[in-house]
């Protein structure tokens, strides 16, 4: 703004100087014409122009235009909004910290629940096994299988000269053991009417019972 004002002032001064010079030229007397070429022509000095001092142009202070759409906020209201915003940010930070703690606690609880479920399944299996054992102990015994005695075969042996109950029991085809003479005597004494082993006679038929 200052440079434009200075240039305008200089332009006005120049116009004034040119106008003054033109006025002086029209008011000066005419110069006589000398026909002789050798005549000395008078030297005409140009008119002296006293230039007017140039007044400095003071800069014009331009105030910035205040926006019309921006409302002015009182200082107290601004401070109140800043305080509320700070409080909201503090509460938000606390909530975020609490959320992080709850997330970690939830993860720990999930792991503990998983472990408890595994222990519960193992305890349930063990309880079922113990229940089966207890039921087996408390239940009355079932009927035992009766084994029928093996069928006995009866063979006959004819007493030979020189035989005794011990000699007959020792034979392979009878018992193969002389100590079983008592079994042979008991099985035949009533049938043959024997009161003692010495009553054995040649030709008697002894029954040999085998299991």
Image (tube, rainbow, N blue to C red):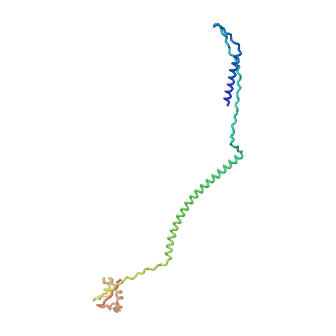
Q: How many marks?
A: 0
Please determine whether, in this image, residue 202 is positioned above or below residue 124. Answer: below
Left of 182 or right of it: where is 104? right
- Using the rendered image of the protein, determine whether residue 19 is visible from the camera's viewpoint: yes
Q: What is the quadrant of residue 95 in the picture?
A: bottom right
Please determine whether, in this image, residue 205 is positioned above or below residue 131. Answer: below
Instruction: Name the residue rendered at 50%, 77% in the picture.
Output: 139
Left of 118 or right of it: where is 51? right
Please determine whether, in this image, residue 167 is positioned above or below residue 72. Answer: below
- Using the rendered image of the protein, determine whether residue 179 is visible from the camera's viewpoint: no
Q: Position of residue 193 (x, y in %)?
A: 34, 92
Q: Position of residue 188 (x, y in %)?
A: 34, 89
Q: Camera-side residue: 209 or 175? A: 209
Instruction: Name the residue rendered at 70%, 28% in the picture.
Output: 57
Residue at the far left: name it: 161
The quadrant of the image that shows the N terminus is top right
The quadrant of the image that shows the C terminus is bottom left
Q: Position of residue 108 (x, y in %)?
A: 56, 59
Q: Position of residue 93 (x, y in %)?
A: 63, 52
Instruction: Name the residue rendered at 56%, 60% in the picture.
Output: 110
Please determine whether, in this image, residue 7 is positioned above or below residue 114. Answer: above
């Amino acid at each position: 703004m200052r440079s434009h004002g200075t240039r305008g002032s200089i332009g006005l001064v120049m116009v004034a100087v040119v106008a003054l010079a033109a006025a002086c030229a029209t008011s000066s007397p005419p110069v006589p014409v000398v026909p002789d070429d050798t005549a000395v022509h008078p030297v005409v000095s140009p008119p002296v122009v006293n230039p007017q001092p140039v007044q400095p142009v003071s800069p014009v202070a331009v105030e910035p235009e205040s926006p019309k759409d921006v409302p002015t906020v009182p200082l107290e209201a601004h401070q109140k909004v800043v305080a509320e915003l700070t409080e909201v940010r503090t509460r938000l930070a606390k909530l975020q910290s609490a959320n992080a703690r709850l997330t970690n606690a939830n993860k720990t609880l999930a792991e503990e629940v998983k472990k408890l479920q595994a222990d519960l399944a193992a305890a349930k299996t063990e309880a079922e096994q113990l229940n089966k054992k207890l039921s087996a102990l408390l239940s009355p015994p079932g009927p035992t299988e009766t084994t029928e005695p093996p069928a006995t075969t009866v063979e006959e042996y004819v007493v030979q000269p020189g035989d005794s109950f011990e000699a007959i029991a020792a034979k392979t085809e009878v018992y193969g053991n002389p100590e079983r003479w008592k079994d042979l005597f008991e099985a035949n004494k009533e049938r043959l009417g024997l009161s003692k082993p010495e009553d054995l006679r040649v030709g008697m038929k002894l029954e040999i019972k085998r299991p």
